[in-house]
Every structure is written in C-alpha cells, then in structure tokens.
Amino acid sequence: MIPGVHSPPRTKASLLSRARPRGETQASPARPAPLPPGRRALDISVTLLAAFCLWPLLLALALLIRLRDGAPVLYPAERMYAPGRPFILWKFRTMSPDPADHGVTGGDKAGRITPLGRHLRRWRLDELPQLWNLLRGDITLIGPRPPLRSHVAARPALFARVLRSRPGLTGLATLRWHAREAALLRPCRNAAETERVYLASCLPAKARLDLWYARHRNLSLDLWILTRTLWPRRRRQRRR
C-alpha cells in the first residue's frame, strides 16, 4: 500500500554557480542508473507528442507572460541531477525577478508572485517548459523531483539514495505532497523559516515516498501516477 495515499493502485556558467538528520553521515557522490532503452524511448515519445499537441498553448502562455509581466519569460532554476551534478530546470516565470532569489517558495515570496503567475502555478502550467528537460534526458517522466543544491548539501546521505533514481517530471511524492507542502510553507514569513519548515517536515516525507516508489515501481503504479497527474482529484470531484 502506498504510504499516505488513500487510493493506491493495485499492483547551465553563472546559472550553475549559484541540520543533517541525526545519524546521517557524508555520502559519496552518486549518479542515477542509466534509463532502460524502452523507458528513454517512452520519454522521447511522450515529449514529442506533448509538444505537438501543446505548442499553441506554450506559445500563447509565453506571449501572455511577455505582454503582461515583461521579460524574461522563462525562469532558469538550478537543480541537481545527482550529487555534484547541477543542471538548469526551465519554468515559465511566475514571480517578479529577484537576483537574490533562492530556496523553496513560502509565504515570504507570496508578494512577488504575479497575478498571471498564480494561475499558472495553480494549474502547474509553469512547468510545461520542462518538456525540454525531458527531451534532453535531464529528467524522466516519473521520478523524484530534482532538488536544490542547498538541500542536497544539507542531506547528502539521503539524496545519495534518492538520486539513484533519475529525477522526474512528476512522481508519487509530488502527487502526495504538493498541496500539503504549499499549506505548510504559506505561513512562513522569511526565507530562514521557510527553509527550516521544508527541511524538517516536507523533505523527509517526500524522500520516504520517493524511496518507496523506487522499491515498488511497476507499470500499474506508473499509470496510476500519470493518471493522477493529468487528472487530479479535484477535477474528478467537479465532474460528479
């Protein structure tokens, strides 16, 4: 049974220059295992199909952001492919630019989110440019979300295990913790508080789900995750 899920299924050079748990020790660098050819072929096929179907939406969103919020349209977010191996994860920009911006988004950043950005975030449309990362092979379709450099440095042994799996566009931890994480971080009023809450509450729980998925992954589970990603619970409830 999937931990914490009620309805389990059966069965980049400047861009890249940007309290460990008790008993956790420094870990040696790890890198994800190579993807099986079939899985890589699936990633490429899904990316090309999605790009073909969604290019009008991608173009419209890019133009809308440019007209309403100005440049830049895209936000380059440094993430870790593996310990010591950063890459650039692309998103549509949803906040007013801040060169000092770093860390996860909590209540301290709420004032910087643009009106359009709120809608993009609500429907996860800001993440559509990650199709490029999927095509490049930076990420795969399903896996742990790629972490920040600071989080890998804070929890090296944990991420040495989590990042044995290729980071993903979506995943079990994303489904289970996206809304809960936002609720926990929303009351945070400064970056230090946001980081403290994230490291203490969100990161460990998400890592447990990522590791559980790595042990129990199968076709049925992957299809369930994809279905829940494309058709969230709230959409299903509105149709009833």
Image (cartoon, grey):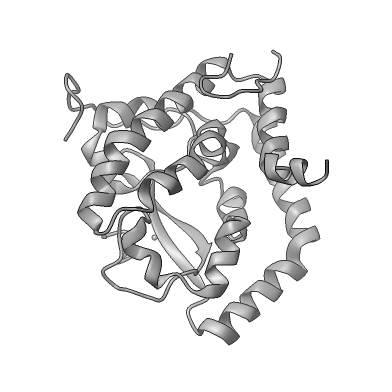
Residue drawn 38% across the image and 56% down it: 105
Q: Residue 99 placed where, x, y %?
A: 29, 73
Horizontal and vertical percent position of residue 136: 57, 51
- The quadrant of the rendering that contains the C terminus is top right
Q: Residue 103: where, in percent of width, then height?
A: 31, 55
State the quadrant of the N terminus.
top right
Q: Is residue 52 left or right of residue 97?
A: right
Residue 9 x, y percent position in the rendering: 69, 20
Nearer to us in this view, 3 or 74: 3
Residue 197 visible in the current orientation: yes
**Image quarter for residue 239?**
top right
Left or right: 120, with 90 as reference point: right
- 13 relative to 236 in the view: left or right: left
Q: Is residue 182 left or right of residue 195?
A: right
Count up the numbered dots. 0
Front-most of 108 and 128? 108
Q: Residue at x 73, y 58 (%)?
A: 51
Q: Considering depth in this image, is 14 or 184 the residue closer to the camera?
A: 184
Question: Does residue 232 sit above or below 176 in this rendering?
Answer: below
66 in relation to 48, above or below: below
Is 159 or 182 nearer to us in this picture?
182
Query: Looking at the image, is 1 positioned above or below residue 157?
Result: above
Residue 84 visible, this angle: no
When the figure is inspected, residue 94 is found, relative to residue 102, above or below; the finding is below
Q: Residue at x 55, y 53 (%)?
A: 133
